[in-house]
Image: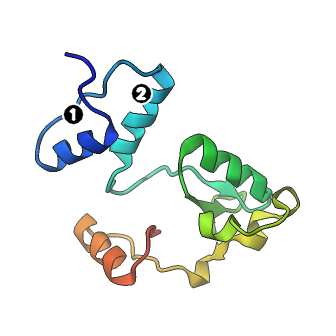
């Protein structure tokens, strides 16, 4: 049977213990996008997140947001040290993204809610709910 489901239904089925099959009527790229949406839903720990470098310009973030359908990224230095996060909220009102560096637009680490290493997934989700944040660096 084809045309079984798309991401919203596959997520709903997974939450009740089922499995949703992404249908084959879309292009391979569209199918991959649907699978990504399902796999990212209430994801656990992301051990190798897609990051952006602090000296890049904001236009690269906008390009990645469009390509990957992510709304935010960890910002790192060249040595992979976490410096902050950049999200849609940080870049939406920037007038010249090609001339604005990420480091000048991001939310710095000192202003972020973070969790200590070793927290369980349930503890992390509780922090996310109580602090009302969408991302939580550990």
Residue annotated with mark 2: 31
Whole-percent x and y of residue 44? 32, 56
Left or right of residue 115: residue 110: right
Q: Which residue is mark 1?
A: 20
Q: Position of residue 58 (x, y in %)?
A: 76, 58
Res 86 seen here: no
- The residue shown at (47%, 28%) is 30
In this picture, residue 69 sits left or right of residue 124: right
**Between residues 120 and 96, which one lies in front from this camera angle?**
96
Q: Quadrant of residue 34?
A: top left
Q: Quadrant of the C terminus?
A: bottom left
**Residue at the spot 60% in from the left edge and 54% down from the top edge:** 51
How far from the left and from the top, in percent, is residue 102?
A: 75, 64
Where on the picture, by quarter, is residue 126?
bottom left
Q: In the structure shown, which secondary structural element does the residue marked by tag 2 occupy?
A: helix
* Residue 56's disc number: none
Q: Let me know if residue 130 appears in the view.
A: yes
Residue at image x 65%, y 62%? 76
For marks 1 and 2, the one nearer the N-term is 1
């Amino acid at each position: 049977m084809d045309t079984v489901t798309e991401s919203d239904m596959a997520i709903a089925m997974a939450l009740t213990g089922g499995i949703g099959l992404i249908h084959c009527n879309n292009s391979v790229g569209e199918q991959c996008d649907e699978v990504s949406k399902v796999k990212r839903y209430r994801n656990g720990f992301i051990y190798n997140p897609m990051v952006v470098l602090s000296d890049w310009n904001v236009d690269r973030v906008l390009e990645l947001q469009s390509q990957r359908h992510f709304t935010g990224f960890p910002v790192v230095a060249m040595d992979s040290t976490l410096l902050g996060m950049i999200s849609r909220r940080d870049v939406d009102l920037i007038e010249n993204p090609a001339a604005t560096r990420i480091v000048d637009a991001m939310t710095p680490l000192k202003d972020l809610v973070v969790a200590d290493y070793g927290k369980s997934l349930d503890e992390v989700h509780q922090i996310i709910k109580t602090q009302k944040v969408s991302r939580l660096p550990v």
